[in-house]
Amino acid sequence: MSLFLLPSCSRSFVNENDRLRARVLELETSVLEATAERDELRARVSELRRAATIAVDPVESDTLDALPRCAGLQIGRLTGVSRRRATEEIIPLDVYLVPYDGRRRFVQVAGRLTVEALLLPAPGEQESSIRLASAELDPAELRDAYRSGLTGAFYVVNLELPTDADYLTGSLLVRAELFDGVTGSIHRAERVIPADRYGEYSGSSRRGGAGGAASRRP
């Protein structure tokens, strides 16, 4: 009789092992995150102690000179529509931002960031630009927006453009403004995205092409 119970017991044993492995992995991840947070707090304490002694023991000038500081802001070439997330209601626009130091190398920043996307009038039109979407990030949100990978390091801000009208026929102007909380400097950047980079997702193209007359929001 016990022989017939062996397969069931074996399956239960395997399932329990899988559950334990998943739990161990979860705990290891939590430990790594907690360790990183602890080390960062230690670094902050060390920084504060160092700052408190600067008046007595000034930091060497060559050390201060070697610290990278944000010298400018660039909107990356990867900025564009996320085809995977496009729907009938929104056109998701991913904005890649690259702060750089005096040697044109990426540098992490702390501060506040504002990003907006504006629709530029088509050539020959006299109408003003229309703001389609915007986002404001506080220092904590800016830190969370940091990404790195095979294409480099950058900050990513996700905007959602509407698709409820046939006016998406002009180019997009993406603008960003970064207030550097460390230096107090303000850095700005702009990038134009041609209509053919996102027009296929607009309301007009979804309903059979953008060849007709374009209408604009009032």
Image: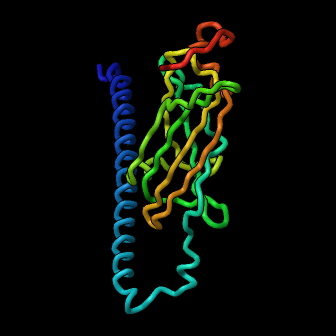
Residue in the foreground of this view, choosing between 40 and 99: 99
Q: Position of residue 126 (x, y in %)?
A: 63, 27
Residue positioned 61% across, 51% down in the render: 74
- Furthest residue in direction top, as rendered: 208
147 horizontally vs 194: left or right = left
Residue in the foreground of this view, choosing between 102 and 13: 102
Q: Quadrant of residue 213?
A: top right
Residue in the foreground of this view, choosing between 131 and 67: 131
Q: Quadrant of the N terminus?
A: top left
Residue positioned 65% across, 24% down in the render: 125
Residue positioned 56% across, 69% down in the render: 68
Q: Is residue 24 above or below residue 13?
A: below
- Furthest residue in direction left, as rendered: 1
Residue in the foreground of this view, choosing between 58 and 213: 213
Q: Is residue 39 above or below residue 9?
A: below
Q: Is residue 9 above or below residue 32?
A: above
Q: Position of residue 211 (x, y in %)?
A: 69, 11
